[in-house]
Image: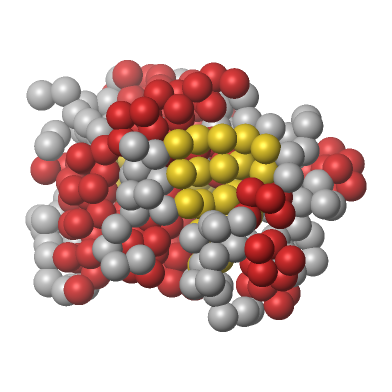
Amino acid sequence: MTPRHFLRDDSVTAAEQAEILDLAATLKADRYGHKPLAGPRSVAVIFDKTSTRTRFSFDAGIAELGGNPIVVDSQSSQLGKGETFADTARVLNRYVSAIVWRTYAQSGLEEMAAHASVPVVNALSDDFHPCQILADLLTVRENFGGKTADLKAVYVGDGANNMANSYLIGFALAGMHITIAAPDGYKPEAEIVERAKEVAAETGGSATVTTDPLAAAEGADVLITDTWISMGQEESGKQRLADLRDYQLDQRVVDAASEGAIVLHCLPAYRGNEITDDVIEGAASRVFDEAENRLHAQKALLAWLVERS
Ligand code: CP
Ligand code: NVA
């Protein structure tokens, strides 16, 4: 049987995304009561980049599902010495029930998936962070009576990174209206925006890009930002801080949004850069619920994928 992979937000349909989120809520309500990976079945969790949330939530989540997490840094494996992704997949197929991988190029994930007989999960690449979006959607559901459709989300900051891409496609898939507010030079690629619009046309959502964060925030239900310097962009960090300084998620943006709007940030946060201390600590902030929901959403995702493979 060909396995299902989760390499980008639209690796699942809108109905499947909703099914995974329903399962996440079920698993959250009975955290230790579901053991679909009992045996235990093992899951490889591989990191080419650093991580706190992704590493701990997958490790804990796989154990809670009755499985055996095998968490490695690629630098301590032969991957770090240049063994091909294809050969790695063909070996891991014989040991584990799923491969979770945080890496740089999306093409690496595609190559791994092409040779994997078990599901491959993108735990963040340069282009997408789809596991984070599932957690964010679960958090949105929890704050808006179980629904996501028709809600308005605004992402302020670096519109050309993995999070912005995933919000565009993943939130559009959930029927939301997603706007990216970013300066020229930091806008999402046309191909991503087109794909998000195509998805939105089917779900009743929308996807737009603007340069004006305050106008965009008007009527928003969900406000989001992310670091201005993603992993791998450290060299141009100084320039990026200067270019993005007018795109901070601050109290002015919160004041422009709807009453009852919530604030999300995938973390780690760099307070004083992309978000102010008062906003991340303020009444609208849901960032730690969001971080917790990584665990529940990823447990649901793994259970869902393994059941179908
Ligand atoms: N949000 C997120 O993926 O955090 P980590 O980089 O700590 O895993
Ligand atoms: N855009 C950030 C997300 C971190 C979870 C990065 O890639 O570093």
Q: Give the side of residue 126 with respect to residue 230, left or right.
A: left
Give x and y (percent) for residue 38.
Answer: 11, 58
Q: Give the side of residue 269 with respect to residue 260, left or right.
A: right
The correct choice, above or below, for 282 with respect to 99 in the image is below
The correct choice, above or below, for 277 with respect to 183 in the image is below
Q: Give the side of residue 118 with respect to residue 194, left or right.
A: left
Quarter in which the C terminus is drawn: top left
- Say if residue 22 shows up in the picture: yes
In-front residue for pair 141/260: 260
In-front residue for pair 264/97: 264
Give x and y (percent) for residue 129.
Answer: 48, 43
In-front residue for pair 24/105: 24
Report the residue at 35% width, 66% height from top. 144
- Give the number of marks: 0
Residue 295 occupies which quadrant of the picture? bottom left
Residue 283 occupies which quadrant of the picture? bottom right
Quarter in which the N terminus is drawn: top left
Residue 64 occupies which quadrant of the picture? bottom left
In-front residue for pair 309/294: 294
Report the residue at 78% width, 30% height from top. 185
Report the residue at 72% width, 70% height from top. 251
Report the residue at 26% width, 38% height from top. 14
Q: Which colour scheme is used?
A: secondary structure
- Say if residue 76 shows up in the picture: no
Give x and y (percent) for residue 128.
Answer: 50, 37
Give x and y (percent) for residue 142.
Answer: 33, 68
